[in-house]
Image (cartoon, helix red, strand yellow):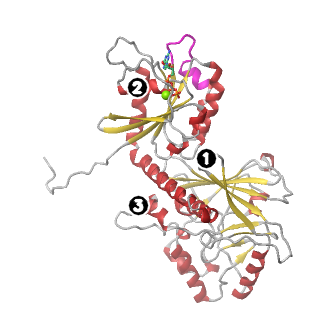
Amino acid sequence: MGNCFGFRRRRLRRHIVLILIGLDNAGKTKTVNNLAGENDDKVLPTVGFKAVNLVHKDTPVTIYDLGGGPHFRQIWPQYYSEVHGVIFVIDSSDFTRLDECKSVLEEVLSNDKISGKPILVLANKQDKSGALDDIDVVEKLNIEPLVNRYRCPTLVESYSARVETNAKKPKIDPGLRKGYHWLLNYIVKRYGDINLRVQTDIHAELERRKRMSQPSNRASQTFTALSDDIATQTGFENPNFEIPKSSKTSDESKDSNLKDLGKGLILVKPIRKPNSIDSTITIESVEESDQSNVARPKLSPLFGRASNTSTNETVRIELEPRSEFRKLSPIVRKKSAVNHIDFKNRPQSSPTYARNMFSQSSKNSSIAEEPRDEGRTLDRKHRVLLNEADLATAHREIVLTAREHTSSDVTHAWSTLPAAPRPASASQLLRRQLELGPATPNKRRLSLRHMQRNKTSPERNTMLIYEPKAKKHLDKGDFETPTAIN
Ligand SMILES: Nc1nc2c(ncn2[C@@H]2O[C@H](COP(=O)(O)OP(=O)(O)OP(=O)(O)O)[C@@H](O)[C@H]2O)c(=O)[nH]1
Ligand SMILES: [Mg+2]
């Protein structure tokens, strides 16, 4: 019987997109031909890519069969954001290329757009004598630690894409059939989560490309994108944020801020890797100088400034939230009726929160407009992202904490706000880690990893910090135990 209210259950329209990759000559095209029921004796090396459309239990499936030659591998990442899963084919009879295969697989899995997505590893050419079976492949390619590291649900299957030529319709090897069905069923079951991530990634990628195509604003806008990803996709307050308790008057505070801004500014510029659309933000310290004629970098207020006060080594990165990202963010979607971000639990992500806080603070008038406390600063628009001093002194790995606020917090004055944060647990929306990567004397990589419940893999934002006059050499040995910042 139909629904008596005349409602029909709306089914989510699914469309699964897979990417088929692996070294050249691995048998990718032969494999997809098998899946499509094509009996093609001679397959030629793929130039560029080929899209194959199939159907799995009423769900359309598109498989991008990409060329595996070294030149074509460079275009693989362009497809990563839009795929729901990966099929990685290996020629298990070609022992000479196992190392190459291993490093290519690691490169794929470590990509931000792939980490966390399901992977089907296919050990092809089992008909050849001496071919490695699936267990050997797992061992030789070190697959287990690799997929654990990048949190990719993985299945390894062995099969042969070579089928009997006299058969009208090629039989699909049971190994291939099993693996293919596992991958599709896995995606179908978690389609909502995986697809949300795919859509968000596609949107972010388009935005980034749009920005990159505007040369005049390239530096500032790229930085905006990066900051926004941190600010809006985490939906949380700044990791090292602490509510400052300043005893200074607003005039004093303004003065000290102006002075600090004059010292050691930081240049922010994007670095583009050749043949890649990815860019990294480099933050370069400018040495302190008394010469007034030294040109200071002009940074757009759009993306905020970054400043480094030489006295306390605080790197201050100011974030400007952008509304476009919010529209797609899972946090926005949580409340169905309106475009509403649940600021109650993430008050510091909210521009209105900051505004309220400041209007509250100015009403109370004992609060400085831009209060400052030992290198940590919060002002009207911005939040502190990294506290260099904290990083440099103790922490190899910092497990960030989430802070619980109730709406009543907003009515408090700065000085009376609860300061003790509650440690984030795995069941909470986010799990974030700040990692201090391997360091050279003057270069450090800081990456912010954060995980959202609705996503299947961590987001990662990386910044390289160059310190021309760095004295400390930070390496693994300097840090022993992870410490929570409170
Ligand atoms: N013996 C044997 N040969 C296979 C098998 N699968 C593919 N081949 C052969 O391996 C060669 C390469 O196959 P392709 O499917 O073109 O390989 P590919 O991975 O698509 O290569 P690119 O498009 O260059 O990246 C072809 O000559 C296939 O006939 C298999 O299971 N057994
Ligand atoms: Mg091919």
Amino acid carrying label 2: it is: Asn
Q: Main secondary structure of the magenta part?
A: loop
Describe residue 224's horizontal placement relative to residue 47 as left or right: right
Residue located 60% across and 78% down the image: 380
Label annotation for residue 334: 3
Of labels 1 and 3, earlier in sequence is 1
- Which secondary structure, mark 3? helix
Residue located 42% across and 17% down the image: 41
Q: Is mark 2 within 8 Å of ligand 1?
A: yes
Residue located 46% across and 50% down the image: 197
Give the percent coordinates (x, y) of residue 425: 56, 54
Confirm whether the magenta stretch covers residue 316. Answer: no
Which residue lies under the disc numbered 1?
A: 276
Describe residue 293's horizontal placement relative to residue 406 as left or right: right
Amino acid carrying label 3: it is: Lys
Describe residue 394's horizontal placement relative to residue 330 as left or right: right
- Which secondary structure, mark 1? loop
Label annotation for residue 185: none
Give the percent coordinates (x, y) of residue 101: 61, 28
Confirm whether the magenta stretch covers residue 130. Answer: yes
Rendered-image quadrant of the C terminus: bottom right
For label 1, the crowd category at 10 Å Cα-Cα, with few meaning under 14, some 14 to 19 and many 20 or more, is few
For label 3, the crowd category at 10 Å Cα-Cα, with few meaning under 14, some 14 to 19 and many 20 or more, is few
Give the percent coordinates (x, y) of residue 124: 51, 21
CA distance for labels 2 and 1:
30 Å
Which residue lies under the disc numbered 2?
A: 33
- Give whichever of 200, 289 is nearer the camera: 289
